[in-house]
Amino acid sequence: QVQLVESGGGLVQAGGSLRLSCAASGRTLSDYAVGWFRQAPGKEREFVAAISWSGGTTYYADSVKGRFTISRDNVQNTVYLQMNSLKPEDTAVYYCAQSSRQRVTTIHNEYTYWGQGTQVTVSS
């Protein structure tokens, strides 16, 4: 069993930056891919970014490509999401999740463990 805890969310103006962290306990993150998803009010949860077990491969949703960067520190058992040039449409609860696979995946059902989420609000 693994527990994932997200942090770093908050309120920021459009154009600003935030860095989200996803810390794991109970089990190492290093053997599996990790992803970030988000869910805005009234919308379905959507894929944001993913990173392979080694960190060698990353993948982004088109809506965040060039603005967000996912990275991981397997020593610290933590995954990060650096979010720059934030837009009001980025407002959502952001979740990190550990995949059951080593390779990156955008498929929700291939993620086994989920955090509780952290709120990101971008004001215009």
Image (cartoon, rainbow, N blue to C red):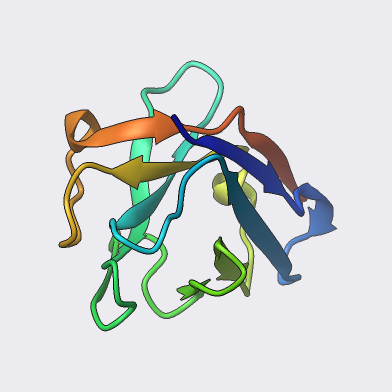
Rendered-image quadrant of the N terminus: top left
**Where is residue 78 shown, x and y percent of the image?**
58, 62
Determine which quarter of the picture holds residue 44.
Answer: top left
Q: Nearer the viewer, residue 50 or 39?
A: 50
Q: Nearer the viewer, residue 61 or 75?
A: 75
Determine which quarter of the picture holds residue 109.
Answer: top left
Q: Residue at x 36, y 54 (%)?
A: 34
Q: Residue at x 34, y 78 (%)?
A: 55
Residue 107 visible in this rendered orientation of the protein: yes
Q: How many marks?
A: 0
Q: Residue at x 75, y 48 (%)?
A: 9
Q: Is residue 18 above or below residue 37?
A: below
Q: Is residue 123 above or below residue 85?
A: above
**Where is residue 28 shown, x and y percent of the image?**
45, 54
Q: Nearer the viewer, residue 18 or 109?
A: 109
Is 83 placed left or right of 9 in the picture?
left
Is 117 placed left or right of 122 in the picture?
left
Is 58 placed left or right of 40 in the picture?
left
**Where is residue 4 shown, x and y percent of the image?**
57, 39
Q: Residue at x 66, y 44 (%)?
A: 6
Residue 69 visible in this rendered orientation of the protein: no
Is 30 placed left or right of 86 in the picture?
left
**Where is residue 62 shown, x and y percent of the image?**
28, 63
Q: Is residue 16 above or below residue 106?
A: below
